Image: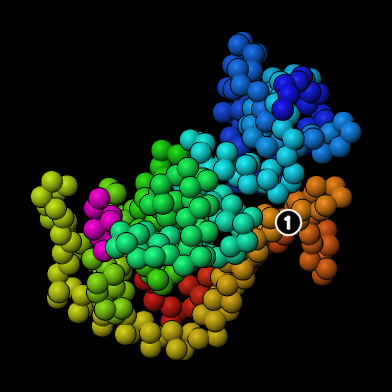
């Protein structure tokens, strides 16, 4: 391991970076700091060729150095192979404070995939929870569970924290997209996202998310609200989550919360839901079209998430930005996702424009 001043143009970012966006304003602030005080911490890189390097950790500093106009950057050169680099890079990144829980959850998922565990975030969270329950009861773990426990130890994060990250990353993609659009100070606490993920039905997740925002619930109230919803029969869940249904929160953090919904209001809304479902039978072709477009959006989102692992072994180019649909090779998959979202919006407008449509 050595420290050297390396030309910035000879360094490429890691394809294993879980950070999805870099805030331009924050990078400019860091660039000003670098100009004033120099780079306090070298970035970490590995050699990929005679005179080329790839970042293991420190992409944000590398980008800020470019904003600062630097030609060279201080770097620690580590002699590791690509598999180890991927894991070290991912572990380094999930410890960063500026990452959202969603991004940390996706980063953890990539760590487990690097070790050969190709599970969904929800299934992995459930498995970690099961392992912790076994350990608390002194029940012996099977070899696969021992492997998972060893990976958690290498990440140096408590299992419950990892589980929360994974749950946040497993929530309905439309909710995640909605949250990522908001400024930091307008986002709901991410622990609420992990609680929402415990509602099995994606549509009910969305309705619960909207209700939590409408009622301006804090994380404790929202957690109790989700727990209360989950105990109700499906038809009552739909009724409680309908817009306009009053929800009363009784108590506080010290005494404990209870969530109450007037029973007569539930019965009234259930009747409305039945009328709506009857109308939906007539609207079936239009509704099916909307659902088809929604599934297409979700499928594109999941495909892009899976492709984060895939890059060209010759050029290092990421599959997510270079793969194309044969039917329209000029458009990237990201552009295809944007078109899929537009198609969904158009389908939703057509559905709402039908006189038989009844708003939730």
Viewer-closest of 240 and 162: 162
- Left of 21 or right of it: where is 239? left
SS at mark 1 in the image: loop
Viewer-closest of 9 and 126: 126
Q: Residue furthest top?
A: 36
- Note whether 136 is above or below 78 in the view shown: below
Q: Residue furthest right?
A: 50
The segment highlighted magenta reads 220-227
At horizontal 40% and vertical 71% (from top left) the residue drawn is: 200
- Note whether 91 is above or below 286 in the view shown: above
Q: Position of residue 21 (x, y in %)?
A: 60, 42
Q: Is residue 64 visible?
A: no
Q: Position of residue 316 (x, y in %)?
A: 80, 47
At horizontal 83% and vertical 58% (from top left) the residue drawn is: 330
Q: Which residue is mark 1?
A: 310
Q: Position of residue 153 (x, y in %)?
A: 48, 47
Residue 73 found in image quarter: top right
Residue 202 found in image quarter: bottom left
> Tag 1: Cα neighbours inside 10 Å, few (<14), some, or many (≥20)?
some
Q: Is residue 224 visible?
A: yes
Q: Is residue 120 magenta?
A: no
- Magenta stretch, main secondary structure class: helix
Q: Is residue 225 magenta?
A: yes
Q: Quadrant of the C terminus?
A: bottom left
Q: Position of residue 89 (x, y in %)?
A: 63, 41
- Left of 141 or right of it: where is 243? left
At horizontal 86% and vertical 37% (from top left) the residue drawn is: 49
């Amino acid at each position: 391991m050595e420290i050297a001043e390396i030309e910035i143009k000879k360094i490429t970012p890691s394809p294993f970076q879980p950070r999805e966006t870099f805030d331009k304003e924050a990078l400019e602030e860091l660039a000003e700091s670098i100009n004033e005080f120099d780079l306090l911490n070298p970035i970490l890189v590995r050699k990929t060729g005679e005179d080329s390097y790839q970042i293991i950790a420190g992409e944000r500093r590398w980008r800020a150095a470019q904003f600062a106009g630097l030609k060279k950057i201080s770097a620690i050169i580590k002699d590791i192979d690509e598999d180890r680099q991927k894991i070290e890079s991912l572990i380094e990144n999930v410890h960063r404070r500026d990452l959202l829980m969603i991004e940390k959850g996706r980063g953890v998922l990539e760590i487990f995939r690097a070790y050969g565990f190709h599970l969904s975030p929800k299934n992995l969270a459930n498995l970690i929870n099961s392992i912790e329950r076994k350990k608390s009861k002194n029940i012996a773990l099977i070899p696969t569970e021992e492997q998972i426990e060893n990976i958690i130890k290498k990440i140096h994060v408590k299992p419950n924290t990892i589980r929360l990250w994974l749950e946040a990353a497993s929530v309905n993609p439309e909710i995640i997209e909605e949250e990522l659009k908001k400024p930091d100070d307008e986002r709901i606490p991410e622990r609420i996202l992990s609680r929402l993920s415990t509602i099995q039905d994606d549509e009910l997740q969305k309705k619960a998310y909207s209700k939590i925002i409408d009622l301006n619930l804090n994380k404790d109230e929202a957690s109790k609200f989700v727990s209360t919803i989950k105990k109700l029969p499906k038809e009552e869940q739909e009724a409680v989550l309908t817009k306009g249904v009053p929800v009363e929160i009784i108590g506080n953090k010290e005494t404990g919360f209870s969530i109450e919904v007037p029973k007569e209001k539930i019965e009234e809304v259930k009747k409305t839901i039945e009328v709506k479902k009857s109308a939906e039978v007539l609207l079936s072709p239009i509704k099916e079209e909307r659902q088809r477009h929604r599934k297409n959006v979700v499928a594109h989102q999941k495909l892009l998430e899976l492709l984060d692992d895939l890059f060209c072994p010759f050029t290092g180019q990421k599959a997510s930005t270079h793969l194309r649909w044969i039917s329209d090779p000029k458009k990237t998959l990201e552009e295809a996702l944007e078109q899929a979202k537009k198609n969904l919006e158009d389908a939703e407008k057509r559905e709402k424009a039908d006189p038989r449509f009844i708003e939730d």
